Image: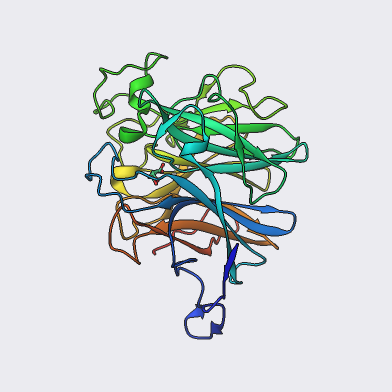
Amino acid sequence: ATTVPAETSKTDSAAGPKFLSQPLVKDIYTADPSAHVFDGKIYIYPSHDIETGMPENDKGDHFAMNDYHILSMDSVGGPVTDHGVALAVKDIPWAGRQLWAPDAAFKNGTYYLYFPVKDKQDVFRIGVATSKTPAGPFKAEATPIAGSFSIDPAVFTDTDGKSYMYFGGLWGGQLQRWQKGTYDANAPEKEPSGDVPALSARVGQLSADMKHFDGPVQDVKILDEAGKPLLASDTKRRFFEGSWMHKYNGKYYFSYSTGDTHLLVYAVGDKPTGPFTYKGVIMEPVQGWTTHHSIIEVKGKWYIFYHDTQLSGKTWLRNIKVTELKRKADGSIETIVP
Ligand code: FUB
């Protein structure tokens, strides 16, 4: 493990804490940060971006990542430790290419790392790997999670101990190819457009061993203020990728990226499986095409982890950041202008 001192951890009264909205690490490129507090420490499970020379296209071929590095911090703004390679494509028996945005969970004395990667037929599936320590290394199961597909797993454990996985992503994430319940290799590369219900994320409850779905996977229903499902034409509000779930004051906040309109938005519901009513924008567009986030509470304050391309200026070489998430008295989230 290597630890990078928090050169940015001092505060300055005019600008506020200097670590906010600055790259958390600079010696590797990182993206898609899924943050959790495990054992009193903050662990971040990001993608590890690399330069491969793959062409940039709407299928995301330029995101050709090979491994994960897990990062940790004792506190937000403190030194960041890079724990080295935690899992690599070569160690996943069924994997082909492209290790995309992961997430992690803790249960039964075990840490679970959930990861999307294309199988040897070039179809995205979601796998799970386990470790006795939060920073790994992780050992992958021999096969993907049965019934999983597409990308961007986000695992949420409710206060009653039940865990749920939210997943899915359009375009390169292949969600549009699963409209009939099986993979359709001939489906268009983009989602249906116009005034038809938008495709949405999926959610499935996880089994007690955290390695299977316990029952069928459902659509995440996101409704407008009139109770109608968001339409495909509503590109500034409809789901694209990058699900996250957090609970605040007994309500379930489902947040996600709108992809080609570059927003992070949220919808609120009364159950972890929805339906959710669209509420607003969490973050305006960042520098770079993608933005992907997680939201956690640390010592009574809420933070959003996200990425942009400040260090490289290149869409496929991103850097993760953190900033504070503020709410109004009614629980609504204040929009962040990065
Ligand atoms: O990192 C590859 C992909 O880019 C992720 O899976 C998406 O959420 C987007 O951030």
Q: Quadrant of ligand 1?
A: top left
Residue at x 33%, y 22% (from the top left corner): 177
Please state the horizontal and vertical placement of residue 217, each as a whole percent of the image.
Answer: 54, 21
Image-based side of 296 in relation to 48, left or right: right
Quarter the N terminus occupies: bottom right
- On the image, which quarter does residue 301 sit in? bottom right
> Foreground: 308 or 283?
308
Q: Report whether residue 236 is seen.
A: no
Position in image of residue 199 (x %, y %): 37, 27
Residue 131 position (above or below residue 76): above
Say whether residue 311 is left or right of residue 279: left
Q: Residue at x 32, y 16 (%)?
A: 184
Tally of marks: 0
Residue 152: % across, % down = 46, 38
Residue at the (50%, 30%) spot, across then down: 126
Q: Residue at x 49, y 66 (%)?
A: 24
Rendered image quadrant of residue 207: top right
Q: Quadrant of the C terminus?
A: bottom left
Q: 118 above or below 72?
A: above
- Asked if residue 186 can be seen in this view, the reply is yes
Q: Nearer the viewer, residue 108 or 234?
A: 108
Side of 299 where 241 appears, left or right: left
Rendered location of residue 58, percent (x, y)? 24, 39
Question: Furthest-bottom residue in view?
Answer: 13
